[in-house]
Image: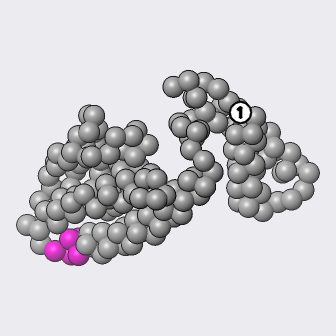
Amino acid sequence: MEQRASRSPWYSALIFGVLMVVWVIFSGFFDFFHLSLGVISCGIVTWLSASLLFDDRSIPARRRIVQGARFASYMVWLTWQIVLSNIAVLKLAFAPRSALQPQIVRYRTPLKTDFGKFLLANSITLTPGTVTIKILGDVFYIHAIDDASAAGLNGEMDRRIAHIFESPGS
């Protein structure tokens, strides 16, 4: 908790730099007006939210890079799962009504960090056929459109998310 309250100028500069690079890439404008708007916007966002990005700042940069690579790998996997789920929901759309079996699934996650749970909840919701509707501690309540969507909650997402935050030697 103590680390969250203190802000290193290097940390804030890093956050500002990342935000500014994203601003320049997405805006596509390189004139003084747009760049100055970017500096102002990124400065305000850095000032308001830099303490929210990384809870534990004692983790070395090398480990953050490994986590970034693992997160990118997870996003590729998640994108493929979204494609597969879209196909399954499309099949359901053309199936007889009896194929739909909406249900609320109670799912316990082994993830302990708030960010891990946040990532899991959003990953579930992004996957067609499932929506995270409530989180109470380690228990997620998820609406699934059919039995196959409910069966997809088999712990694979949890394992992949947990792997992102493991130490590099794991």
Label 1: element kind: loop
What's the magenta region?
Answer: 91-95
Of the pair 129 and 111, the residue shown nearer to us:
111
Q: Is residue 114 left or right of residue 14?
A: left
Asked if 86 appears above or below 56 in the picture, the reply is: below
Q: Is residue 36 magenta?
A: no
Which residue, given by chain and number where applicable, does mark 1 sit on? 8
Quadrant housing residue 91: bottom left
Provide residue 164's location: percent of width, then percent of height. Answer: 44, 56
Residue type beneath disc 1: Ser
Which residue corresponds to the image point at 32% horizontal and 45% vertical from the top-left?
111
Q: Position of residue 37 (x, y in %)?
A: 81, 44
Screen quadrant of the C terminus: bottom left
Q: Position of residue 29 (x, y in %)?
A: 82, 60
- Residue at 20% of width from left, 47% of height from top? 107
The dominant secondary structure in magenta is helix
Report the front residue among 132 and 61. 61
Q: Furthest-right residue in view? A: 32
Is residue 7 placed above or below 69 in the rendered structure?
above
- Image coords of residue 135 (percent x, y): 29, 38
Q: Is residue 42 left or right of residue 4?
A: right
Q: Nearer the viewer, residue 23 or 60?
A: 60
User: Does residue 42 appear anywhere in the picture?
Assistant: no
Q: Place residue 66 in its image quadrant.
A: bottom right
Is residue 35 positioned above or below 137 on the image?
below
